[in-house]
Image: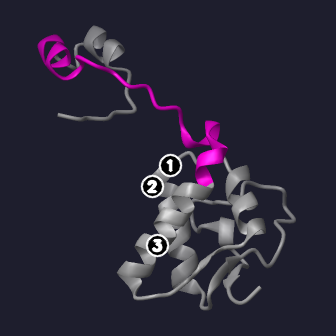
Amino acid sequence: LISATNSNLSEAIERGVFRLDLYHRVCEFAIAMPPLRERPEDVEHFAGLFLSEANGDMGRKVESLTDDAIELLKCYSWPGNLRALRYAIRRAMVVCSGQFVVRSCRNSTRRSPVTNKSIGAFRGSNLSQP
């Protein structure tokens, strides 16, 4: 059994919201995985994986992300971790067309590239020939 949580189970046990016996059954071996924001070197790998996945799901043939698009993705803190990155890649592919994911405009507001309402990592970007 492999399980994951973003909750502190020890604290949950102390508060009485998680059973101690269940904790001992599922927590024989714990692996701590740092959040994606602490592993920017992994962003390019996962972005490529999600691009391939989305190509298959959407029947597209997008080849890759340009270097500037990858650098933009690496600079973001990814509070939603891999789910947010997957969504950003899929969003870019839905709203754009072409063979490459490129960053075509700069974020002049200096805010985080991703917002709650839209995936701004590719806002103003397109999928086109570089």
Which badge, 1 or 3, comes first in the chain's sequence? 3
Q: Are marks 2 and 1 in contact (CB under 8 Å)?
A: yes
In magenta stretch: residue 24: yes
Closest to the observer, 127 or 99:
99
- Residue 17 against residue 14 in the figure, above or below: below
Query: Is the residue marked by circle 3 packed among few (<14), some (14-19), or many (20+) residues within 10 Å?
Result: some
Quarter holding the N terminus is top left
Question: Where's residue 6, x and y in %?
Answer: 40, 32
Q: CA distance from mark 2 to mark 1?
A: 6 Å
Which amino acid lies under the numbered mark 2 shown in the image of this protein?
A: Arg
Which of disc 2 and disc 3 is earlier in sequence? 3
Give coordinates of residue 10: x percent, y percent. Answer: 33, 13
Residue tagged 2: 83
Q: Secondary structure at mark 3?
A: helix
* Amino acid at dot 1: Gly
User: How far apart are the two marked residues, 3 and 2, measured between alpha carbons?
Assistant: 15 Å
Q: Is residue 51 left or right of residue 128?
A: left
Considering the numbered disc 2 on the image, is that residue within a helix, a strand or a loop? helix
Nearer to us of marks 1 and 3 is 3
Q: Please state if 87 lies on the left or on the right of 64 as rendered.
A: left
Residue 42 versus residue 18: which sits nearer the camera? 42
Q: In the image, residue 55 lies at what x, y percent?
A: 45, 80
As displayed, is residue 28 above or below residue 31?
above
State the separation of the CA atoms marked 1 and 3.
Answer: 20 Å
Residue named by callout 1: 80
- Magenta-drawn segment: 20-43
Helix, strand or loop under label 1 = loop
Task: Give the residue pinned by disc 3.
Answer: 52
The answer to if 16 sits in the magenta stretch is: no
